[in-house]
Image (cartoon, rainbow, N blue to C red):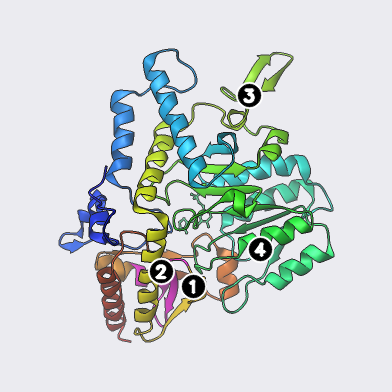
Amino acid sequence: MTTLDTSRAYDVEAVRADFPILRQMHHENVPLVYLDNAATSQKPNCVIEAMDRYYREYNANVHRGIHKLSEEATTEYEAARLKVRKFINAGSKREILFTRGTTESINLVAQTWGRANLKAGDVVVSSVMEHHSNIVPWQILAAEKGFTVRYVPVLPDGTLDLDHLYNLLAKEPIKLVTLMQVSNVLGVVNPVEEVIKKAHEAGALVLIDGAQSVPHMTVDVQAMDVDFFAFSGHKMLGPTGSGVLYGKRALLEAMPPWMGGGDMISSVKLSGSTWNDLPYKFEAGTPAIAEAIGLGYAVDYLNQVGLDNIHAHERDIISYALERLKEVPGLTVYGPTGENKGAVAAFMVQGIHAHDVAQLLDSEGIAVRAGHHCAMPLHEHLGVSATARASFYLYNTHAEVDALIAALHKARKTFKL
Ligand code: 7TS
């Protein structure tokens, strides 16, 4: 499945050999330096091959046919669910719902649990640092239902104002606290275990957006005692169109379905319908079969390399990057710089717009993202309309950080700074 020798110390070159895209030239003769992993990760051969195999060898719909191909597709699709269950230590495969990604997972909670449980006078707590996918679904529903959404502020060091959150929890009954575990801009790792404990003590449920945590660190939803947990397959070496919503079984059982259609029903009569068991109640229609299978293989790969090894490698890379970024005059990195930072560095170079930084880096073969990173309220808080962002993953190297720094110096020269 991989050329990796897991008995050796972390071998980044062996990891890189599993990712075909990393061998390509970005422009004619500049090698690709891919530093946009918070947007989406690259895919290892085993994921690409698993999806290819599905289409070439056993393409069929799931949960329907009696024929061999359909049985094989169903087995692989459900095997992926079991792999995901184990990966985040959910108690049951019934608690693992396949979605198209974090966005769909959060919208599912808003449109089912939220629609059934939130009314005028209720309060939902989110934060200023959230990705739009954890702000807008609540705004849409709040406009209809008349509940209030409050936002936990961000402190100057880029961490959440936890005192503010705990005061809110002490002051008024909160129905739901919905927060990201790791910020896609600041990189800050929020202390979600502590937040969940305090929220539960105050009688609130908790949804955690794990889009930027699950790919990079061990997540145990049972130890965390989280109520809902959302993440995307494509940021953890899996394909786009794959994602997961974990929910505690009792909550999911009590929630009405969201989309209606095939597979989610137990029986349909013209006078009314009844719902299928979990997780199928929330998986209407033909699912993204190849994508779920691909995600299962991504989980296998992450397990093989080892999340602890990946986490340690990323800590090494981000620490090195933060040190070296200090060498670039006029460069500001946002967010914390210590242990509570994931492998994300959003920055500004004084005198150069973030989009120009990204374009100049691109001409050197370096892929970063520039803009508001779907976190406009956070950028408003930071007082900037856009940042450039380098985000790292298991295959990035010190040499790539060096290339980033050299290109940033070159960009400053181009702008005569
Ligand atoms: N939550 C967080 C923390 C994210 O970083 C993202 C995507 C999402 C939710 C949405 O995930 P999706 O898979 O449903 O789109 N973040 C980014 C990013 O930082 N750059 O591009 C996508």
Q: Secondary structure at mark 4?
A: helix
Q: Identify the secondary structure beneath mark 3.
A: loop
Dot 2: few (<14), some (14–19), or many (≥20) neighbours within 10 Å? many
Circle 4: residue type? Glu
- In the image shown, does 336 or 75 lie closer to the viewer? 75
Would you identify the image quadrant in which residue 202 lies? Answer: bottom right
With respect to residue 82, does 357 lie above or below?
below
Tell me the magenta residue range: 342-358
SS state under label 1: loop
Query: Which marked residue is nearer to the observer: mark 3 or mark 1?
Result: 1
Q: Secondary structure at mark 2?
A: helix
Answer with mark 4 or mark 1, whichever residue precedes in sequence: 4
Determine the residue positioned at 25% across, 64% down: 365
Q: Earlier in the sequence, mark 3 or mark 1?
A: 3
Provide the residue designation for mark 2. 315
Say if mark 3 contacts mark 1, CB within 8 Å: no
Q: CA distance from mark 4 to mark 1?
A: 17 Å
Asked if marks 1 and 2 touch (Cβ < 8 Å), the reply is yes
**Can residue 188 be seen in this snapshot?**
yes
Residue for point 48% across, 41% down: 84
Q: Which residue was labeled with disc 3?
A: 276
Magenta span has 350?
yes
Contact? badges 3 and 2 (CB < 8 Å): no
Q: Which residue is mark 1?
A: 339
* x, y percent for residue 59: 35, 24
On the picture, is 314 further left or further right than 231? left
Which of the numbered marks, if any, corresponds to residue 194?
Answer: 4
Residue 155 in percent (x, y) is at 62, 76
Residue 32 in percent (x, y) is at: 24, 60
Q: Is residue 316 above or below residue 271?
A: below
Q: Amino acid at mark 3?
A: Asn
Q: Nearer the viewer, residue 4 or 7?
A: 7
